[in-house]
Image (cartoon, helix red, strand yellow):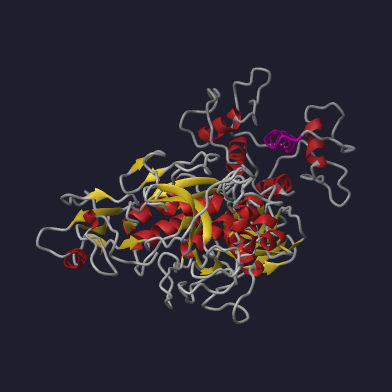
Amino acid sequence: MALASDAVEAQLEVPDSPGHASDHVLVKLEETDPPRALAGVEESGVDGWLSLPVPEGKTPADFVAELNARPDVEVAELDPIVQLDPPVLSAGHFGSVTVNDPDFQLQWHLPAVQADQAWGASTGTGAVVAVVDTGISKGGEDLACHEFVSPYNAITDSSGAAAANDDHGHGTHVAGTVAQCTNNGVGVAGVAFGSRLMPVKVLNSGGAGVISDIAEGIEWARTHGADVINLSLGCHCEASIVDEAIEAAVADGVILVAASGNDDGNSVFYPARHPDVIAVGATDFRNVRAPYSNRGSHLELVAPGGDLDRDDNDDGNPDGVLQETFQNNVWDYYYIEGTSMATAHVSGAVALLLGAYPEVSPMVLRTALHTAALDLGPSGFDNSHGHGLVQVHDALLTDLERPVWTEGTLLVESYGETSLTFTWSAPTDNEAVTGYLLRRDGSEGLVVNDRTATVTGLSPGTRYVFEVLARDEAGNWSEPLSAAVRTAQAFTDTAGHTFYGDILWMSGSGVTRGCNPPAGDRFCPDDLVTRGQLAAFLVRAFGLTKSDHPGFVDVAKGSTFESEIGKLATGGITRGCNPPVNDRFCPDDPVSRAHAAAFLVRALGLTKNTHPGFVDVVDGSAFESDIGKLATAGITQGCNPPANDRFCPEGALTRGQLAALLHRALGTSLRD
């Protein structure tokens, strides 16, 4: 799997290492309007990247330098060529017999990663593994159980099983280790045989291909449902186009696994050395680093790659990785060595973990693999073995189930000018939830033990994005609960007012814009609320947007609250002010406390009424039921504290009182 110049098809015109395409370069343009026209340009298959032919008489390097000097070019790069090593095969290979997976006993490498032990918990069912390689062929006898997912050929930009058929043999061998049909009485076994395979052909019949096709293969896998991307390929190169494809895949939760390379060198191949990719080295039967396996600080894990020069298990066969594939059109069961083979074991292990824990985050999954790995070499991480040899059964025994928000609500309990107090619902988890992290605008955040926290030091009237994450005893973090909120902007006429805190809530939550537009620096807390104003408050508080009501005869088209009144009527919160006709709304009439109860009960959908009643609310009166429901929900306590045995149903509602009612109503309705 090392970069080399032999066995490459002529059209690639491969020079000496490191090697790149000589007929085209890669370019990404700055955004212009209209877009810049370039002769002969072709889409690369990765968003924003183009393939541009090299003009006659220019070298690719000179053309790249010329393009990078242009103001309309964001970046131009060479297109490196990846070349697989010629396969190293055992002197003999094995035909099938008629017992169940007859050659599994020769696959020493599967028990080495605990695959057989892990099958009791998972076979990888539900996971899709994209093998970005030379394609996958089912020309043998032992892959018949698989229906491929979205096969694709990035070289020819064509889809379908025929397009992604393997004409080299490498990709088929790799795919077999990942997910060979198992318990079918034929041949050999695979690590995650319950998973599904996605063949993505990016290398030709000589095992070579340009890096831009690999980027396109990653992009195809990401956009067509891959959970894992196996990259048993690489080179000593770098490519921004691949970086972008990897970063997009990681953002979508895809896990990428790549080979470290077979140079016996001190640096890991690319893309394995990308920080978001699991870089895999190779071991032999003795759990010793294979002599060809690259080393380096980017190496993350090792897995069996084999050594065909040894027979340490004394079975009479070389200690390679055994799988079905073809060489020179001869199908059989071949021993092959390499970090390509090691990578396939790790991709299979990831699929097993995803089969058992489909919601596990990539970060948690990688940590589980690190923690469970068999430490080899010097204690702890080292450049020859990374975190150690993959032990997938032990990884499955760790707690990978992260907390889940069953009722995802991050609620502002109280608004201040420079502070916000949050509460949130309780997540569920198989282990105890031990803490929470509240972050502001992506900051490191505030660690708390309870489901409430106050954040201080904020700016008045400023919008922030907060998110909270839950952590369980095993260290698994939930997905974040997010909320975009704004601190309150105090009004000049509310300091010391009874309902000051409620008015701050009204300001912060965007329910009020003040009483003196356009300045909006006063709230007029003791002014009476009209029905038109109430419509505006309720529409903002409940986020009403739909309006298909024919209108009321006393609400003029284009008048101040005409839109809000229509939305309120469409939502069924008002029926009008003159029953039973109800063709009028009376927008300028003051709102009584009884009317406010009816509006809120309809807006909130309250149905429960267990309140004993108020002395001034007559049984069976027009709003008796609504007032009882409002009191049952804790939204009103009465009008004569501390006794609170009266409701004052005919009393006119002030703007301050409405702030208190809305604050209690929305807080109660959203809190779990």
All told, the count of numbered labels is 0
Image position of 657 with respect to 89: above or below: above
Q: Which of the 4 image quadrants contains residue 565?
A: top right
Image position of 8 with respect to 661: above or below: below
Give x and y (percent) for residue 165. 39, 44
Q: Main secondary structure of the magenta part?
A: helix
* Closer-to-camera residue (262/35): 262
- The quarter of the rendered structure image containing the N terminus is bottom left
Give x and y (percent) for residue 152. 39, 44
Q: Which of the 4 image quadrants contains residue 31?
A: bottom left
Side of 120 relative to 386 (left or right): right
Q: Which residue does the image show at 36% across and 52% down from the upper left?
A: 202
Start and end of the magenta stretch?
A: 593-606
**Is residue 412 among the parts visible in the rendering?**
no
Q: Which residue does the image show at 67% across and 68% down from the upper left?
A: 447
Image position of 518 with respect to 451: above or below: above
Give x and y (percent) for residue 211. 33, 59
Furthest residue in direction left, as rendered: 57
Furthest residue in direction top, as rendered: 581
**Is residue 178 among the parts visible in the rendering?**
yes
Side of 370 relative to 308 (left or right): right
State yes or no: residue 54 in magenta.
no
Give x and y (percent) for residue 124. 61, 49
State yes or no: residue 600 in magenta.
yes
Q: Which residue does the image show at 63% across and 56% down from the upper left?
A: 105
